[in-house]
Every structure is written in structure tokens, then in C-alpha cells.
Image (spheres, helix red, strand yellow):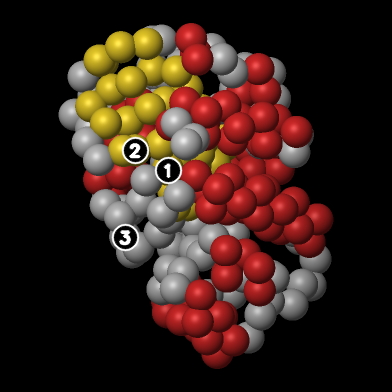
């Protein structure tokens, strides 16, 4: 049986192999009931061991293991927002960081609907206002954003996603990085977005969040 620690080690290796976790940046967590297992501060996601995992309560109390990442409050906020989700991935992936330095496409999504896969696998992804990494107010800013979402860009910082399971969270993080890459490649050009009716149909079919007002912007 795979333990939460084994799952985190495997997820860390996967995002590192994908080239979206430079150096010792990024953190991953998994929730089991009211206990959260999270990669520790300053860990290399591609070289995780049992000793690199922190165990905390959903209230943030450190139970055992490594010192939790300074972004713990951000992970806990996502678990509070999407209560059915059991995994969170936060990365400083290059294209997501670059996209997070641009003005957002709309209030509800920093990234426009350029491909069906972004809509199907991620959904609208708002921009969280900048706060210094580790500032608890970053979590408050995220929770204050309008509309449903399971992914966000942190201004001048990176990306964060949540999902019902760890594999799905990693897949969403990889897809979001690709969506940011495509958005950057087409930025400033006369690009063609998906038709609003198709965005709506995709979001409904795949159960991803997409607010109508976002679909109609630009």
C-alpha cells in the first residue's frame, strides 16, 4: 500500500523530471482526513526522502517530521476553499512565473482559453495579488478572489493547483505550465481564442470551473 510519504516522493520526482521545479523551489502536499503531509522547507522535489516530509493538522499545528514549507498557509487555504480536494501542488515553473508577471487576461482567469486542454484539465486560473512568499496574507488574498477555481497564478511568483488526488494535481500543474507557455508565445499577437460556447461546453462536460463573464472578455 502506498503511503502519503511515498506518494509525495513520487510526485516530487515527476514534477522534477518534467523540468518545472527548478532547484529547491516548490512544494507538494496531500491531505488524509484532517492531517496534511507536506514537503519540508528548502527541499529538492526531485530528491525527496522520508525525512523531508512534514506532518501537520489542517489547523497548521506541526505534528512531526521536517519543518513545513513557508507556503503551508497557502496549501491550507486551498484545502479550505476546495474541501473535496486532497492534494495541492505549488511550483515556480518558468512559464507560469513569466505569465504571472503579466497583467491578467480577465478578473477570473489570468490565462485565456486558447486550448481545449487548459479548459478541460485546469479551468479558469485567476491572478493572486503579490505578497512576499510565505506571507500569510497571500492565502487571504487567494480566498478573497471571486468565482470558483482549482488553480491560480501568484503574481510574480508561480502557480498553485489543487485536485481530488495527487496524480490529478500534478497533471493539472503540468497542463497549466503548458497553457502559460502558449499564452506567452501568442501574447501581443492577433490570436484566436476558443469560441465562448465551446469553452462553456468543455467546462460543463469536464466539470472544471469557468465563469461566464470570463468567457466573454477580450
- Distance (Cα) linking label 2 and label 3: 25 Å
Q: Which of 45 and 195 is in front in this view?
A: 45
Q: In x, y percent, where is residue 67?
A: 38, 10
Disc 1 or 3, which lies upstream in sequence?
1
Q: In x, y percent, where is residue 59?
A: 19, 29
Q: In x, y percent, where is residue 207?
A: 44, 73
Residue designated by label 3: 146
- Which residue appears at 44% of the width and 63% of the height? 108
Q: Which of 97 and 122 is in front in this view?
A: 122
Q: Is residue 72 left or right of residue 200?
A: left
Q: Nearer the viewer, mark 2 or mark 3?
A: 2
- Which residue appears at 37% of the width and 11% of the height? 65
Residue designated by label 2: 31
Q: Is residue 155 left or right of residue 146?
A: right
Residue designated by label 1: 87
- At mark 1, the secondary structure is strand
- At mark 3, the secondary structure is loop
Residue sitting at the far front:
1
Disc 1 or 2, which lies upstream in sequence?
2
For label 3, count other residues whose C-alpha is less than 10 Å away and answer few (under 14), some (14-19) or many (20+).
few
- Distance (Cα) linking label 1 and label 3: 22 Å
Q: Nearer the viewer, residue 21 or 48?
A: 48
Work out whether 125 lies above or below 205.
above
- At mark 2, the secondary structure is strand
Q: Quadrant of the C terminus?
A: bottom right
Q: How many marks?
A: 3
Amino acid at each position: 500500500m502506498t503511503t502519503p510519504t511515498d506518494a509525495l516522493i513520487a510526485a516530487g520526482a515527476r514534477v522534477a523530471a518534467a523540468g518545472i521545479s527548478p532547484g529547491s523551489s516548490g512544494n507538494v502536499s496531500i491531505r488524509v482526513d484532517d492531517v496534511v503531509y507536506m514537503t519540508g522547507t528548502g527541499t529538492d522535489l526531485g530528491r525527496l526522502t522520508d525525512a523531508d516530509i512534514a506532518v501537520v493538522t489542517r489547523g497548521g499545528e506541526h505534528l512531526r517530521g521536517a519543518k513545513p514549507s513557508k507556503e503551508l498557509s497557502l496549501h491550507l487555504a486551498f484545502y479550505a476553499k476546495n474541501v473535496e480536494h486532497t492534494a495541492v501542488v505549488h511550483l515556480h515553473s518558468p512559464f507560469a512565473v513569466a505569465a504571472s508577471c503579466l497583467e491578467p487576461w480577465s478578473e477570473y482567469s489570468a490565462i485565456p482559453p486558447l486550448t481545449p486542454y487548459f479548459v478541460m484539465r485546469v479551468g479558469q486560473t485567476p491572478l493572486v495579488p503579490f505578497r512576499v512568499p510565505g506571507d500569510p496574507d497571500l492565502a487571504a488574498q487567494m480566498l478573497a478572489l471571486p468565482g470558483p477555481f482549482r488553480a491560480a497564478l501568484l503574481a510574480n511568483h508561480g502557480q498553485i493547483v489543487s485536485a481530488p488526488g495527487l496524480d490529478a494535481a500534478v497533471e493539472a500543474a503540468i497542463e497549466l505550465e503548458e497553457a502559460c507557455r502558449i499564452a506567452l508565445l501568442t501574447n501581443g499577437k492577433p490570436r484566436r481564442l476558443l469560441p465562448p460556447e465551446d469553452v462553456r461546453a468543455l467546462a460543463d462536460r469536464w466539470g472544471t470551473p469557468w465563469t461566464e463573464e470570463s468567457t466573454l472578455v477580450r
